[in-house]
Each structure stands twice: as structure tokens, then as C-alpha cells.
Amino acid sequence: MSSSQTTTVNDPHLDNTTTTNNDTLPNNNSQEPSTSTDSSQYRSSTQYSFKPPPENSKTSTKPDLDDNEEEKRDDSMYVCNICLDIAKESVITMCGHLFCWPCLNCWLETKPQRQLCPVCKAAISKDKVVPLYGRNNEKQQDPRSKKSPPRPQAQRTEPDNSQNYQGFQSFGDAGFHLSFGIGAFPFVFFGSSFNFNDIRQRNGQNGSQFEEDQFLSKVFLWVAIIFFCWLILA
Amino acid sequence: MAVNMAVSRIKREFKEVLKSDEIAQCSIKLELANDNFTELRGEIAGPPDTPYEKGTFLLEIHVPETYPFNPPKVKFITKIWHPNISSVTGAICLDILKDNWAAAMTLRTVLLSLQALLAAAEPDDPQDAVVASQFKDNYEMFCKTAKHWTNVYAKGPHKFPDFDAKVQRLRDMGVNDFDARAALSRHNWDINLATNDIF
């Protein structure tokens, strides 16, 4: 009763089935995905799936597509890979797969020990998904008001402005605390290092740069402590 | 949310199945077994160039409330002689139906994976140990037995009159049809060993 069979089906159509198949439908009217949920309709339609496609299936009805149809084709690009509906509170993984945030969060909570992308099984984590903000973003409710935890924040990098020296203007910036702190040596180091934690965590910016900064601040902290001890001993 | 999501996803998957002409070519079929989209019936055609060729295999699919975060429960209704499928219960040993399930998989990909499993057995990771050892030790006998089962249970075209005759002899002794065929299959169609096994 063990299990490790590796026969999985490579499925290039998974993401865009609805898009491609619309082209080859023999008759769009009869196959129009009805909103009806009548089960008898589905029963009868299964018979269709066994028939070979009619010969004229390649003579596509593309020009006949009305606006509604066109809209659906466009929408199918933005379907969540879990609920198969248009993605709401969309997030995208580093491997490029689109999900609703509640869906992805539910999947990650189902398997806390194996955090894999549901589509390509790449390693993913909550911290490394990117939220997508569309134009009508402000109409959306605050995700935090819902049951699922808030969607992760986007990471935003300030444009590089090193060319015109603005050091004094960015006085409040945590990085500059260091250079000004040297005057009142060890004490300010304590202050600035704690500042670091505070500001970054509040912003939810916990990327690798943050880790690097934290490491640096720790190093300086120890230098300060050693310096302090040396002062006392001497 | 979970129940609604399972149902709405199955509905969407249905649309996907009936739109997909690729499915029609591979001879895969999906239909409802009850009205609330939790029990379904799948059907796959045996892949060509295998002992299951031209057979039609029925599957029972149960969709859990936590679908698609947990895999559907699938087993064979049609009796089949395969190392990774129990010849008695139809239980399937396939990683994607257990630990390797991913929420983006659909009933369509599950059915296609099962079809692929029929074409590529994994005797080193068996569900039915007897079938797996026959597969490894006596592949020719395995193929004949699997073809015979396909003929009897899955409407396959290859008849084996000598196998049928042996089954008939055991039935004459009061053994039921399936028990006789299973016992003979387990013992490489040696009627003496099969008789000893049963009585």
C-alpha cells in the first residue's frame, strides 16, 4: 500500500484550455457555456465528449464571435488555477502562476510542510507571492476585513537617486542614522539597530536586504560592546 | 466556503471536459453519479499497444468536501489485472491521488494520468503484490492474463478459450466466476495450484 508512482500528465493546456478550445468548437451556440447548473444538461453533454470532432471543426467561427464571447476569451487568461474562476485578490507566484489569495492561502494551509506551487510544484511561500493591483483597485474591499489573512504586501524599491546627493534630506532614513550616530558612539548604535527592526517589520519589508541590514547592525552592535568593554577595562 | 468551492469547481471542470476535443480523442468520459456533484463516474479507454487496448474501464470518483485542496477518491469499478491496481477492490496506487496531489489538477488530468498508469506500470511500487511479482517474473503470462481480464470485464477483443475452459472447470466445482478466475490468474493458470488455493 505504498505510493510513489510518477505517472503524471504534462498538461500544457491547463492554463488556457478555454481559450484554445473556443477556436475549435463546431458550433458556438450549442456549446456556449451556459450558466445553468441543471445536471441533466451535463449528463447529456457527456455523450458529446466521446464523439470525434466534426470535420468542419477547423473552420473556426472566430469572426462570428460577438463582444461577449471576446470578453470571455480575454478573461480566461486571468482565471485562478485553484477555483477556476476569475481571480479575486489576485496574487502571482514567483513561478508565474495566478491565484486568488484566499485559494492559495487555503492550499498553503492544507499542506504546511510541503509548500509547492499547485501548478508546477515549484517551492513557494507566502512571503514571495506578488499581489496584482488592477486599475479598479480602489473599489476592492480591504482584504484584511475578510476571514483569510491579509494578502501579502507588494515590495516597492525606491528609484536610485544616488546621482544627486540628498543625504541630509533623508535624515529620517534608517541607513543614515548610522553615519550620524558615530559621534555619540556606542549608545546611538543601540538606538539605530532597534530602529531598524521596528521600521522594517512595520512595513512588512522582510526581504534579503533586510536580513543583510540586520546582520550588519548586529556586527556593529558587537563592535560597540567590545569597544565599551575595552573602555571600562582600560 | 469549502463545500461550495468543491461543487463550483466540479461544474467548471465539467465544462472543461465537454469542451475538450482532446478528451474525445483519448476516449475519456466523465458523468455524474448523483445530483450534488460529489459522486462521479469516469471512463477511460485502454491505451493502445498495451494488454488493456480496446478495453473500457469504469471508475468511481468521490469528490471530498475539501476538494480541490485534497485529491478525489478514485477506484476502478471494472476488474483489472495491473500491478498498481488491486485485482479485488480496484484500489489504485498512484502518487497524485495521495501525497503528490496539487490543487491545480483536475478530474481530466486525473483520468489522463490513470490512462498513463495503464500504459506504464510500476511493479516496484505495487498495490497488488501478486500481480506485480507475475509482471516481473513472467511478463508474458502477465500480458496474457491482463488481456484476458480486459476481454472478460472490459469488453476487450482478445479471447482465450483455454483460460475460459479452466475457469469453467472450477465453476463446475461450485466456485464462483470471479474467484475462479482470480485464483487461476494468481497461479499462472495452473489449475491444480488454483484448486488447492481455493479448497
Image: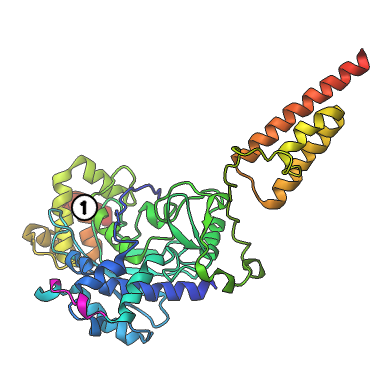
Q: Would you name the residue on which mark 1 appears?
A: B119
Residue B17 at x, y = what percent?
29, 71
Q: Is residue A163 left or right of residue A10?
A: right
**Outermost residue toward the top in this view:** A234
Magenta-span inclusion, residue A113 = no
Please report the residue visible at 35 percent of the width from the left and 75 percent of the height from the top. A72
Chain ID at mark 1: B
- The number of discs equals 1
Please report the residue visible at 74 percent of the width from the left and 40 percent of the height from the top. A168
Please report the residue visible at 8 percent of the width from the left and 59 percent of the height from the top. B160
Which quadrant, please, contains the N terminus of chain B?
bottom right
**Viewer-proximal residue among B99 and B91:** B99
Residue A10 at x, y = what percent?
29, 53
**Outermost residue toward the front in this view:** A164
Per the image, label 1 sits on a secondary structure element best described as: helix
Residue B21, quarter of picture: bottom left
Please report the residue visible at 51 percent of the width from the left and 50 percent of the height from the top. A115
Q: Is residue B169 left or right of residue B67?
A: left
Residue B94 at x, y = what percent?
35, 53
10 Å crowding of disc 1: few (<14), some (14-19), many (20+): some
Q: Is residue A131 left or right of residue B55?
A: right
Q: Tell me if residue B175 can be seen.
A: no
**Viewer-proximal residue among A71 and B68:** A71
Please give the range of residues in magenta.
A58-65
Q: Is residue B113 above or below residue A219?
A: below
The amino acid type of the residue labelled 1 equals: Ala
Q: Is residue A94 above or below residue A182?
A: below
Residue B36 at x, y = what percent?
42, 81
